[in-house]
Image (cartoon, grey):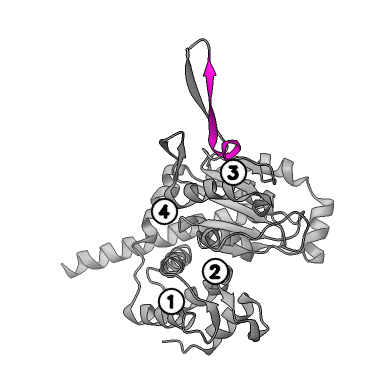
Amino acid sequence: MLRTDQNQASAQSASTVLRATQITQLVDQVSTIIVGKREQVTLSVICLLAGGHLLIEDIPGVGKTTLSQALARCLGLSFSRIQFTADLLPSDLIGVSVYERQREAFVFHPGPVFAQVLLADEINRAGPRTQSALLEAMEERQVSVEGETRPLPSPFFVIATQNPSEQLGTHPLPESQLDRFAMRLSLGYPDPVAERALLTGQDRREAIGHLQPLMSPQEWAGWQAKVGEIHVADALLDYLQTLLTATRDGQWFAQGLSPRAGLSLLKLARARALILGRSHVSPEDIQTLWVPAVAHRLVPLPQSGRSAAAQARALLESTQVP
């Protein structure tokens, strides 16, 4: 019996390592397109593996759209893109019913939201009505059209890009929508070596066209199911709860983290452990993901003089690790 248990544990460990190797290949392939940003690519894959939506905030032209397209291509998922503007209507996103004379009936024509990966480009340029329509899709994985509920494809990811708030024509996203994003990233400018590779290499759009899917949607869904099997020790849950409680006591932030944020961070930590070939979550998983996963949900105290990200980092550093 003991030998059988050992064999099963060995087989499970080998399977975990195999998954880690396969996802490393995914990161490697996307990193050939988004040069010099391996950390951000890895975090993006973790976010999607955890079933979360991703918000990328940066200036135009640094590769936000390219990253979204490359991820969808490598994962073998259907992809659509919609440019958010001030006059964008919910029907432009969801779809609309059109009367067809031949059928003598209204026929629903689905909008770009009916894709497995939706790129919501410059999301903070749209008005409240369109944001509300997207909010339902992000939270419920469904949309309501003319009194009828229509499910979205599975898996369903929103990768949204956001321009800095000081740019013209932007509007701050409501807190309720920010809370639906599992992670917020910034790509930033490339370093000199990466930029030289971009200047002398193949056009990124052409390079995306040559990418080959590394898995099927069914395989990806299977990997997502494995995230919930990653073990979380009680001591680590205590550590996470200590961090969550500290954001709510009024000493660090004017607005702390919701229970949804805690659940999302825990799932992200499990996904990171999985791709690193571990069967358990470690404090390092929480620490690495803390700022990308929570900073966009927090409102710092005015007297702190710090950004939400800087304040979140300071709180993490002041909290004892179990």
Q: Earlier in the sequence, mark 3 or mark 2?
A: 3
- Whole-percent x, y for residue 52 in the image: 49, 57
Identity, as a three-letter code, of the amino acid under mark 4: Trp
Give the distance between the C-alpha atoms of the residues marked 3 and 2, in whole angstroms. Answer: 30 Å
Q: Which of label 4 and label 2 is nearer to you?
A: 2
Residue 126 appears left or right of 259: right
- Whole-percent x, y for residue 272 in the image: 48, 66
Q: Which labelled disc corresponds to residue 73?
A: 3
| Disc 4 crowd, CA 10 A, few/some/many (<14, 14-19, 20+) | some
Task: Identify the magenta region.
Answer: 90-100
Give the distance between the C-alpha atoms of the residues marked 4 and 2, in whole angstroms. Answer: 27 Å
| Disc 1 crowd, CA 10 A, few/some/many (<14, 14-19, 20+) | some
Residue 312 versus residue 131 in the image, above or below: below
Task: State the SS at label 3.
Answer: helix
- Whole-percent x, y for residue 17 in the image: 43, 62
- Whole-percent x, y for residue 303 in the image: 64, 86
Q: Which labelled disc corresponds to residue 282?
A: 1
* Outermost left residue: 1
Q: Earlier in the sequence, mark 3 or mark 4?
A: 3
Give the distance between the C-alpha atoms of the residues marked 4 and 1, in whole angstroms. Answer: 20 Å
